[in-house]
Image: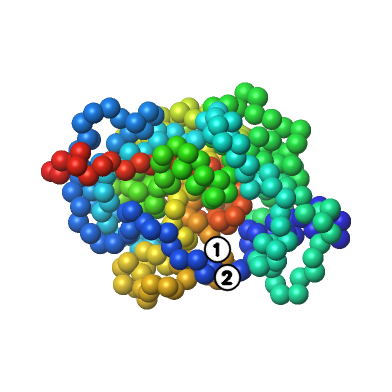
Amino acid sequence: MNKLKLLQSIAAVFLLLPFSCKEKSPQEVNTPEKLTLSTQPKPSGEAPKDMVWIPGGEFTMGTDEINAYAAERPAVNLSVKGFWMDVHEVTNREFSEFVEATGYVTVAERKPEWEDLKKQLPPGTPKPDDSVLVPGSMVFSPPPYAVPLQDISLWWKWVEGANWKHPEGPESNLEGRENHPVVHIAYEDAEAYAKWAGKRLPTEIEWEFAARGGMNGKRFAWGDELTPNGQFLANTFQGVFPHDNTGKDGFTGTSPVKTFAPNNFGLFDMIGNVWELTSDWYDALKFARIAGQAPKLDAGMNPCYNPDNPYAMERVIKGGSFLCAENYCVNYRPSARQGHAFDSGTSNVGFRLVKDQEEQNLSMK
Ligand SMILES: [Ca+2]
Ligand SMILES: [Ca+2]
């Protein structure tokens, strides 16, 4: 097995193969319980820089739409407290300010440790040579021809030296992309940035409430049509995935944040551009459990559940990306959700953050 093949196999294990998820859920500020919370008007005083107030309240999370993926169903009525949210995805410029201030080194820039990797590999997997355990990340690298859509390794490649500063590998850089969303971010990288910024990652319920912009029950964040009057309202994939990306919306890769119209809350790129990390573990039956159609998870039980990958340790990502096409991964919808390996980044996943308002400053309706 050559070096690339070996790294691809390790990366595939990172992303696809089962391993035990024993960690408990983090403390969740807005848990998806059937609470009734009123809308909370915008607090008085100055808004945090580049953030908008998301008023919270009751809404319909998930969907009953038959064309949606099973993990999005059924629709459940939930409510969420108000919070501040970044108006755009964290950009390369912002992330570079964090790195300059702290010297932080992302997961993709670190040498993978065999002691960590082997916990996630089938017992007895032989240790690869140290020379192949090198820093890198997963980059979208489609072939120039149509391929079967069942095998993601046909378009995702492990690239040595790929990281947030070099999104396509060592020869690439961020020139001209300072205002694009940062990518190749693992969950712990996003948490480190959040701590520095005095913010936190949103929970899944907060993210979905915000993405809907008050348009309850709509298929898209802006209504029921993907491109009303032919207008593109998000950076997604036009053409035939994965090989024929026409870029009809203006972009075949990431786009500068705030390029497309904001939603009703003033949030940009909630749908498309890059997927966004949330603080929830991925449970494919989350809504079924809330609706009483599947057993509840008791305290101490594995919070991750993915029938396609029963022991995967994944966080929920939301909103889809520039790689979501009509013929594959139709995830440019507020209810769409996927699991994403907690310890890896890719070239189409980023994040944005939220911040709580101190209770004494809130006046309830
Ligand atoms: Ca596009
Ligand atoms: Ca996004």
Q: Residue at x 36, y 69 (%)?
A: 289
Residue 143 appears anywhere in the view: no
Decide: is 31 above or below 352. Answer: below
Give the amino acid at mark 2: Ser
Left or right relative to 134: residue 350: left
Q: CA distance from mark 2 to mark 1?
A: 7 Å
Q: In which quadrant of the rendered image does the N terminus lie? A: bottom right
Q: Earlier in the sequence, mark 2 or mark 1?
A: 2
Q: Pick the residue in front: 93 or 249.
A: 93
Which residue is the extreme one toward the right?
A: 2
Q: Residue at x 70, y 66 (%)?
A: 118
Q: Where is residue 127? Give x, y as percent.
A: 79, 65
Q: Are marks 2 and 1 in contact (CB under 8 Å)?
A: yes
Using the rendered view, name the quadrant where residue 92 is placed. top right
Q: Pick the residue in front: 9 or 298.
A: 298
Q: In which quadrant of the rendered image does the C terminus lie? A: top left
Give the amino acid at mark 1: Met
Q: Residue at x 77, y 54 (%)?
A: 133
Which residue is the extreme one toward the left?
A: 365
Q: Where is residue 320? Give x, y as percent.
A: 50, 46
Decide: is 145 above or below 292. Answer: above
Left or right relative to 299: residue 309: right
Using the rendered view, name the quadrant where residue 250 is placed. top right
Q: Residue at x 22, y 44 (%)?
A: 359
Label number found at residue 123:
none
Residue 193 appears anywhere in the view: yes
Q: Which residue is mark 1?
A: 313
Q: Where is residue 97? Give x, y as percent.
A: 55, 30
Decide: is 287 above or below 203. Answer: below
Q: Which residue is mark 2?
A: 20
Left or right relative to 55: residue 315: right
